[in-house]
């Protein structure tokens, strides 16, 4: 027989206690007691940012065998299985099929799940098909989508899609020249990149069109993917054996290991799922 759960706050009904506790920082809720910990994943508490990772089998050198989409709980230092989440429109551009086609190479489309049709729609095409030669990396920043087709010090091309005007623009020179590794935006207000050769993390200064140093570490050399949110940048280290987490305000870094037997392919910073949005979650 299940034991009755103690009240969240003695002397108050749980629905009133949850209104009080929802203002307590999530880290404190997790550390006090089990009933408060369970409250973290209820609809009463606003979703907080968590680290999600796409994993593959550590024995698969090609990375083709995906083990699943998992999330890291920073409060318990544990990994949780979770579903993906899309907070805004998705854009794809400059594709390639079984045979080269100029039309497909210049094509760009958008998918917005918040629309009534929730289908793919065409947007302004690229001026040419040069981006179809290699996989392009795209980052949203201040209402625009920034794409660069090559990492590292090699000659590269960049292009910018202006969502408001539905037009493609040239990328600022300083932004393009310093884009030398994986890149991510922080709530679309700041862009961070890592020089995969030196292990230096930088943030872009759009007023002066230059990159500013943030932190340098051997662990960041060879970085393969990154995501940002909540004042922190999460970086997949070379080989996918670790995730480096950088608190940009405090200029501190620590590491998170994936579940045993897995390696990290990519990371994402998303709001924590609640029990109302995940029917398989046991509250």
Image (tube, rainbow, N blue to C red):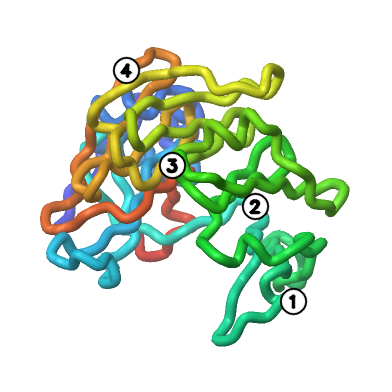
Q: Which residue has dot 2 on it?
A: 88
Residue placed most toward the observer, 66 or 35: 66
Is the residue 55 above or below the residue 76 in the image? below
> Label 1 neighbourhood size at 10 Å, few (<14), some (14-19), many (20+)?
some
> Residue 89: where, in percent of width, then height?
67, 56
| Tag nearer the camera, 4 or 2 | 4
**Tag nearer the camera, 2 or 3:** 3
Question: What residue sits right under mark 1 in the picture?
Answer: 103
**In front: mark 4 or mark 1?**
1
Give the SS element for disc 4: strand
| Badge 1 vs badge 2, beta-carbon distance below 8 Å | no
Q: Earlier in the sequence, mark 4 or mark 3?
A: 3
- Position of residue 34 measured from the top left corner of the image (x, y, whole percent): 23, 37
Residue receiving disc 3: 152
Alpha carbon of mark 1 to alpha carbon of mark 2: how far? 26 Å
Nearer to the camera, 272 or 139:
139
Label 4 to label 1: alpha-carbon separation? 47 Å
Q: Residue 28's x, y, as percent?
A: 32, 23
- The residue to which callout 4 is attached is 252
Q: Earlier in the sequence, mark 4 or mark 1?
A: 1
Disc 2 element? loop
Farthest residue, direction front? 155
Q: At numbered mark 1, what does the secondary structure look like: helix, strand or loop? A: helix
Q: Which residue occupies 45% across, 18% down?
A: 213
- Residue name at image x 48 percent, y 44 percent: 154
């Amino acid at each position: 027989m299940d034991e009755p759960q103690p009240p969240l706050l003695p002397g108050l009904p749980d629905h009133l206690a949850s209104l009080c506790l929802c203002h307590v920082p999530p880290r404190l809720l997790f550390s006090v007691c089990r009933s408060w910990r369970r409250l973290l994943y209820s609809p009463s508490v606003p979703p907080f940012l968590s680290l999600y990772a796409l994993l593959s089998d550590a024995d698969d050198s090609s990375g083709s065998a995906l083990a699943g989409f998992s999330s890291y709980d920073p409060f318990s230092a544990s990994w949780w299985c979770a579903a993906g989440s899309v907070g805004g429109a998705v854009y794809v551009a400059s594709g390639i099929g079984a045979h080269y086609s100029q039309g497909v190479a210049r094509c760009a489309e958008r998918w917005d799940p918040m629309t009534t049709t929730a289908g793919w729609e065409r947007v302004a095409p690229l001026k040419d098909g040069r981006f179809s030669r290699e996989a392009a990396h795209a980052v949203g920043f201040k209402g625009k989508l920034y794409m660069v087709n090559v990492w590292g010090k090699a000659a590269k091309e960049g292009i910018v899609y202006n969502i408001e005007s539905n037009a493609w623009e040239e990328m600022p020179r300083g932004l393009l020249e310093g884009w030398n590794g994986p890149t991510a935006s922080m709530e679309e207000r700041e862009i961070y990149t890592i020089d995969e050769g030196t292990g230096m993390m930088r943030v872009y200064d759009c007023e002066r069109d230059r990159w500013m140093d943030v932190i340098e570490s051997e662990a960041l050399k060879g970085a393969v993917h990154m995501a940002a949110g909540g004042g922190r940048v999460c970086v997949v280290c070379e080989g996918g054996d670790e995730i480096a987490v950088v608190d940009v305000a405090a200029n501190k870094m620590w590491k998170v290991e994936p579940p045993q037997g897995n390696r990290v392919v990519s990371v994402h910073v998303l709001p924590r799922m609640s029990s109302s949005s995940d029917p398989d979650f046991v509250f």
